[in-house]
Image (cartoon, grey):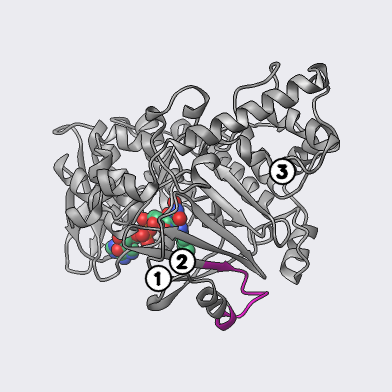
Amino acid sequence: MHYVIAGGGAAGWITAAVLSRYLSAPSTRITLIESEDIGIIGVGEATVPVIGELNRLLDIHEPDFVAATNGTFKLGIEFVDWGETGRRHFHGFGDYGEPIAALSPHHHWLRLHRQDNTIPPLDDWSMPWAAASQDRFAPHEAMQGEAAEFRHAYHFDATLYAAYLRKIAEKHGVKRVEGRILHAARHSETGFVTHLDLADGQRITGDIFIDCTGFASLLLERAMNVGFRDWSHWLPCDRAATISSARAGRLTPFTRSTARTAGWQWRIPLQNRTGNGHVYASSFLSDDEATARLFDGLEGEALGEPRMLRFTPGRRERFWEGNVIAIGLAAGFLEPLESTALQLIQTGAARIIELLPGRQPEPALADEYNRRTTLEYERIRDFIIAHYCRSCRSEPFWRHVAAMDLPDTLQHKLALWGASGHIALYDMESHREPSWVSVLIGQGVLPRAYDPRADMIPPDRLTNLMKQRRAYLAQAARKMPCHDYFIDKTCAADQRL
Ligand SMILES: Cc1cc2nc3c(=O)[nH]c(=O)nc-3n(C[C@H](O)[C@H](O)[C@H](O)COP(=O)(O)OP(=O)(O)OC[C@H]3O[C@@H](n4cnc5c(N)ncnc54)[C@H](O)[C@@H]3O)c2cc1C
């Protein structure tokens, strides 16, 4: 079986590394074609904790990986001015502690908040925030009890990351071909892709073709004519202006996302620089204004010129068609608000391993791949829309997103939340209850009711218990090393680059 991967960005090299780890030669060959002239998109610097599974699968040594990619650690995302100007909340990679009387702690917080709306924010019961708010970091394995209930992810240089994965994949036997793909030929009867013709005259034949050609989607869209489902009506942001700036101050162990008049701005700390980007809706803000706002938001001196990127949010109608499977930007795009793109690449590659190895592509396998991938995209889409649709900000963009129709799945979720404080979790959700709770309560979207069982705990007992937990987490976090110090001691980039 010959797998041909077209494209060598993060999607191509993650897929190549995963496939080569599982599928053994000589029965399997893997070839990856990429073009240095075209290059990679080179953004995609914030991740979510599921990347830890990928690292374990590929036997990646964390300090080596972080050092090689100029990386830092990430405990979550701080949202600033979302919901309304002046508001801050944290989506941490963890929960709000053990259930109390078999109920998620947020119900108890809601009860206390109803009695006294000056109580500390729910974030104070999150271990990731306890650490992040003090710029401290240690992996959860170094902690104990409730203070160990969190996970971490990374920030890294996207170009160095692709190069790092390339080394791993090549070590496992992936053959890299340099060249520009001009044409994909299809079999006249089956419609399957039979080979790719490159500009220099090379012809690459194969059995399975994985389209990792980024927004170009050369194989799935151009060769197989699979359409695109446009989600702009729910996610109107369609551009990003990006720039790096000089590192300023301490390294924060979190991404920051600040709401702007027609979108939002990210701040991603790397060891040697800070990544910045302004994601915005071009129908509400001009490119010039967006670039000016990007510069206003920089903490350090700008490095180089801004880059402008255009995108259409949405997904392919099908991700697997015939013998072509698209992964990465070729498969779809959701704005990077929750850093989910690399996760979608990772789960796509894992799904290929589960459904395809050594088999001919059959319709049932493709249907299952498409069913699950569709749901995964739609769940993440709903989660991202939830950051916009209940905002009280007054600018035209925010009034527009607060008034738009919502997907049925999200409507139900928000209705249930409003009526009960419960989250309806569907099949293939990437974000569990604490994530939804953090985004909704964080933006001030409080339900009309909480679970009545919360009232069964005597008020004094509950108040004491919540106080103790909060103090315990803050104290546990104080024992963690500073994030800068942890990096210096374990994985400093300048020792190795
Ligand atoms: C503004 C923005 C911010 C983002 N931020 C994040 C983030 O914080 N976190 C996150 O997880 N994701 C983020 N993403 C998404 C992330 O960048 C991508 O998912 C990731 O980089 C994978 O891209 P890719 O490999 O699919 O495409 P690309 O990096 O574009 O790679 C495409 C590959 O195909 C090759 N290619 C194309 N055409 C041809 C041809 N004709 N012949 C040969 N080779 C060809 C190219 O050379 C390249 O190797 C962001 C995306 C954008 C647009």
Amino acid type indicated by mark 3? Ile
- Locate residue 215: give its quadrant: bottom left
User: Is residue 406 one of those drawn in magenta?
Assistant: no
Q: Is residue 413 visible?
A: yes
* Depicted 439 relative to depicted 213: above or below: above
Stretch of the chain drawn in magenta:
278-289
Total marks shown come to 3
Which disc, if any, is residue 276? 2
Q: Nearer the viewer, residue 251 or 366?
A: 251
Q: Are marks 1 and 2 in contact (CB under 8 Å)?
A: yes
* Depicted 99 relative to depicted 170: above or below: above
Residue drawn at x 17%, y 66% as measured from the top left: 201
Q: Position of residue 407 (x, y in %)?
A: 72, 47
Amino acid type indicated by mark 1? Ser
Q: Are marks 3 and 2 in contact (CB under 8 Å)?
A: no
Dot 3 lies on which element? helix
Q: Nearer the viewer, residue 276 or 463?
A: 463
C-alpha span from label 3 to label 1: 32 Å
Choose the circle earlier in sequence order: 3 or 1: 1
Q: Position of residue 16 (x, y in %)?
A: 27, 44
C-alpha span from label 1 to label 2: 7 Å
Which disc, if any, is residue 245? 1
C-alpha span from label 3 to label 2: 26 Å
Residue drawn at x 44%, y 49% as measured from the top left: 253
Mark 1: C-beta under 8 Å from nearest atom of ligand 1: no
Q: Which residue is mark 3?
A: 441
